[in-house]
Amino acid sequence: MILEIITLGDPVLRRKCPPVEIIDGSVAQLAAAMIETMHAADGIGLAAPQVGVSLQVAVVDVPPMEGEAGLFCLDGVDKDPAAFMPLVMVNPILEMGTEKESQSEGCLSIPEVRGNVLRPFAVIARYTALDGSRHLLECDGLLARAIQHEVDHLNGILFIDRMSAAAKLRIRRALRDLAREPARYRYTPGPAQGG
């Protein structure tokens, strides 16, 4: 089922989400709907508050980059990331690497706005999977950036909060327009996409 993506201005995007206490069928259904919604909107990540649910659940699906052999070490073993996508993370906690890089980011909840954000290049993520198993994932590159972006959502932080003051000035008008007419920018499925 494709869900409505909440846009800037909705207070749910600014709340720190409580942890998931029990991973049951409703959490699995939410994750499946989030994955379907993310794919329908051509995104690579989505957090529960972006679909109006204040819970620590995030999904990412980062395709392998041509010629890039990024780090993907799950529970101490190097793995092929494609075998684990889409990745569902419940109650994720991050440890950030020290090396940082600036890259352009966008967000399904802030459509038509992009800006450079300085983030750690690598992260260690501790999270629970839908089957209740706990994992430790070390990754870098675009996957690490996507995970950081989605975990920020779980803490009420948007990518625009991490932009420089000068970069925020450049997007000020777009943010004002979005806040004024959020419904115009909301993603809702068309008849061919169901839902």
Image (tube, rainbow, N blue to C red):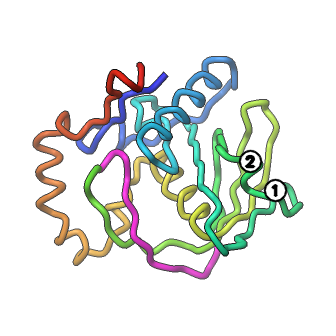
Q: Residue at x 65, y 43 (%)?
A: 86
Q: Residue at x 61, y 66 (%)?
A: 65
Which residue is disc 1 drawn over?
74
Callout 2 environment at 10 Å: few (<14), some (14 to 19), or many (20+)?
some
Q: Quadrant of the C terminus?
A: top left
Q: Residue at x 56, y 73 (%)?
A: 120
Residue 26, image x and y in percent?
61, 18
- In this picture, is 129 found above or below 120? above
- In this picture, is 74 found above or below 101? above
Query: Which-is-in-front pick, marks 2 and 1?
Result: 2
Q: Amino acid at mark 2?
A: Phe
Q: Amino acid at mark 1?
A: Leu
Cα distance between the residues tagged 2 and 1? 10 Å
Quadrant in the rendering for residue 124: bottom right
Residue 70, image x and y in percent?
70, 70
Secondary structure of the magenta portion, mostly?
strand
Outermost residue on the right side: it is 77
Contact check, label 2 and label 1, Cβ < 8 Å: yes
Quadrant in the rendering for residue 50: top left
Q: Residue at x 61, y 56 (%)?
A: 63
- Relative side of 153 to 131, left or right: left
Outermost residue on the front side: it is 192
- In this picture, is 167 found above or below 174? below
Q: Which residues are magenta?
A: 97-110
Q: Between 163 and 146, which is closer to the camera in this rendering?
A: 146
Residue 171, image x and y in percent?
19, 65
Q: Secondary structure at mark 1?
A: strand
Quadrant in the rendering for residue 24: top right
Q: Between 42 and 76, which is closer to the camera in this rendering?
A: 42
Q: Secondary structure at mark 2?
A: helix
Disc on res. 84: 2
